[in-house]
């Protein structure tokens, strides 16, 4: 078996073992769908809005830089290659093209870094909120529920993708009262509104 297939199976076995031991010891267990929490909290919504605005500004700057490049190319192309200013115009165009490529790479790297930092920051807040809700409810264990959706039309995906979706699912059954995702969302939104 491949390691990607073994990991969810090991997790499922561990959870089943914990659940069976927990029922014998009256341990309280809950689940949280971290993806749902991440997508539904206000902080993520505000962050997405900010990122969309930043993307629009970046696209406007990109368009401006492309227009400058086209203008430089047009100015160079208006000259004959033997004209005295052709080399100078060609040099300006090449320098602007290199500067544009470097600018694109730097912007891409900055966006990637910011997104990774923001995702980790929000995930850390999620784990903190889960701990707070668990403590308030007297829970002993909170399992991160992963529930990838299988598309209605299976013709859209192949057998390996179906297998992957099935293997990624780590909670096969739980009653609705076990899921504390909405309480975590409410706690995080309250903290975010309060500026914490």
Image (tube, rainbow, N blue to C red):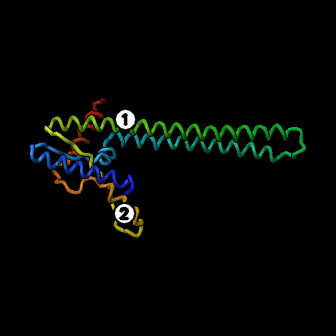
In the image, 192: left or right of 177?
right
Which residue does the numbered mark 2 point to in the structure image?
162
Residue 59: tell me if it is visible: yes
Query: For this view, does 93 lie left or right of residue 23?
Result: right
Which corner quadrant of the image does residue 5 belong to? bottom left
Specify the quadrant of the image occupied by residue 49.
top left
Q: Which residue is mark 1?
A: 121
The answer to which of 59 and 24 lies nearer the viewer is 24
Q: Quick one: 89 or 2, which is closer to the camera? A: 2
Q: Which corner quadrant holds the C terminus?
A: top left
Nearest to N terminus: mark 1 or mark 2: 1
Q: Position of residue 105 (x, y in %)?
A: 59, 40
**Residue at (89, 38) in percent of width and height:** 84
Q: CA distance from mark 1 to mark 2?
A: 31 Å
The number of callouts visible is 2
Question: Can you give x and y, in whole percent of width and height, for residue 65 in the image?
Answer: 64, 41
């Amino acid at each position: 078996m491949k390691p990607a297939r073994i990991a969810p199976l090991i997790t499922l076995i561990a959870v089943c073992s914990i659940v069976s031991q927990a029922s014998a010891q009256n341990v309280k267990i809950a689940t949280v769908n971290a993806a749902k929490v991440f997508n539904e909290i206000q902080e993520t919504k505000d962050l997405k809005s900010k990122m969309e605005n930043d993307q629009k500004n970046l696209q406007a700057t990109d368009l401006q830089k492309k227009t400058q490049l086209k203008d430089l190319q047009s100015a160079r192309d208006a000259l004959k290659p033997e004209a005295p200013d052709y080399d100078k115009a060609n040099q300006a165009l090449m320098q602007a093209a290199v500067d544009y490529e470097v600018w694109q790479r730097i912007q891409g790297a900055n966006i990637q870094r910011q997104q990774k930092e923001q995702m980790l920051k929000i995930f850390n807040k999620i784990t903190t909120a889960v701990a707070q809700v668990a403590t308030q409810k007297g829970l002993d264990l909170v399992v991160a529920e992963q529930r990838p959706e299988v598309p209605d039309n299976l013709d859209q995906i192949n057998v390996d993708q179906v297998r992957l979706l099935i293997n990624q699912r780590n909670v096969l059954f739980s009653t609705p009262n076990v899921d504390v995702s909405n309480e975590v969302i409410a706690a995080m939104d309250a903290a975010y509104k309060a500026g914490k």
